[in-house]
Image (cartoon, rainbow, N blue to C red):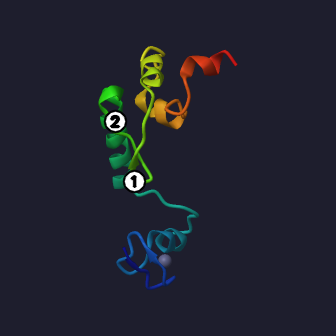
Amino acid sequence: MKDCNECGFQKHGAEERCFDCKAEQAGKRSYIQIEYLRMLDSEKRRFNNLDLKDIAFIENGKIIEIPEKYIEDFQYVGLSNMDFILGEYYKKPFFDEENN
Ligand SMILES: [Zn+2]
């Protein structure tokens, strides 16, 4: 990251202007970096193809312990590994949740 010549902040894409300033100059309110979206999609597919049992989950720099039951329950519900994380099913048992 470099300093943007226009806004002065250290931001992504700042060769002369950061992406925010480039978007604003183009009359847009926001921007999407296509290479970044492709990287996210590729990372999502990589993650979804892994076996949950074989993954070291790291949050805030530390490996987090996930009870085996949470993973075992989740593997049969037909959701993706992304759902396991984004739905926070690594913090609670899937089936207990449904019975609440
Ligand atoms: Zn800027």
Between 78 and 65, the one nearer to me in the picture: 65
Query: Vertical placement of 24 versus 78: above or below?
Result: below
In the image shown, does 4 or 95 lie closer to the viewer?
Answer: 95
Question: What is the number of the mark on residue 33?
Answer: none
Which quarter of the image is occupied by the N terminus? bottom left
Residue 66 sits above or below residue 11 on the image: above
Residue 55: x and y in percent read: 32, 34
Cα separation between marks 2 and 1? 18 Å
Dot in front, 2 or 1: 1
The quarter holding residue 66 reads: top left
Instruction: Say which element carries label 1.
Output: loop
Which residue lies under the disc numbered 1? 61
Residue 90 drawn at (x, y percent): 49, 32
Quarter of the image where the C terminus is located? top right
Contact, mark 2 vs mark 1 (Cβ under 8 Å):
no
Of the numbered discs 2 and 1, the one sitting upstream in the chain is 2
Q: In the image, residue 47 lies at what x, y percent?
A: 34, 35
Examine the image and state in which quarter residue 67 appears.
Answer: top left
For mark 2, give the secondary structure. Answer: helix
Give the numbered dot on residue 47: 2
Question: Does residue 6 appear to the left or right of 57 in the view shown?
Answer: right
Q: How crowded is mark 1: few (under 14 residues within 10 Å), some or many (20 or more)?
A: few
